[in-house]
Amino acid sequence: SLFLGNVFRHQHFYEKCSTCGECVIGNYGGICPVTRCSKSLLNGPCGGSIKGMCEVDNKKECVWISIYDRMKKSNTIDRLSKVLPAKRHSAGTIPGRVINGA
C-alpha cells in the first residue's frame, strides 16, 4: 500500500501527498493543492468557499487560504501569478483510503 500523510490521532490521518507523479508542491509553499483541494485546483480557489470553508467539505478550510497565507508570509506570493496547465490525473493513485486491520 502507499499512503503519505500525517497522524492526526489514533486511526485518523491527514493525507499530505497523493503521489500524482507530477509534483507541484514547490509552487505552493509546501502545500499540495492536488491533494488538499477537494477539486484538485492548481490555479487558485474555485470561488465557492463560504466563510473560508470548502464548498465540497464544509468542515475543511479552503486550502487556498492556507497556501496564500503561507506564501504571503514567506514573501513568495508572486509565484501564484503563474498559470499552470491542467493536471494529468491518470498518473495519480487517488482516491486513496486507509483500511484499519487489513
Image (cartoon, rainbow, N blue to C red):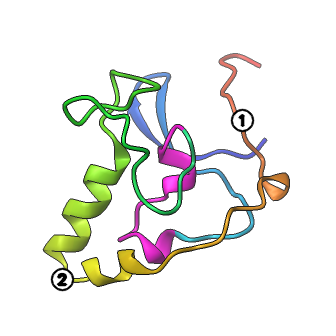
* Figure quadrant of the N terminus: top right
Frontmost residue, 53 versus 25: 53
Q: Residue at x 73, y 46 (%)?
A: 2
Q: Position of residue 87 (x, y in %)?
A: 70, 62
Q: Position of residue 27 (x, y in %)?
A: 45, 76
Stretch in magenta: 25-38
To which residue does mark 1 refer? 95
- Residue 43 seen in the figure: yes
Residue at image location 50% in from the left, 69% down from the top: 25
Residue labelled with disc 2: 75
The residue shown at (37%, 34%) is: 48
Which residue, as the protein is rendered here, is positioned at the far top? 101
Q: Is residue 102 above or below residue 63?
A: above
Q: Secondary structure at mark 2?
A: loop
Amino acid carrying label 2: it is Asn
Circle 2: is it few (<14), some (14-19), or many (20+) Cα within 10 Å? few
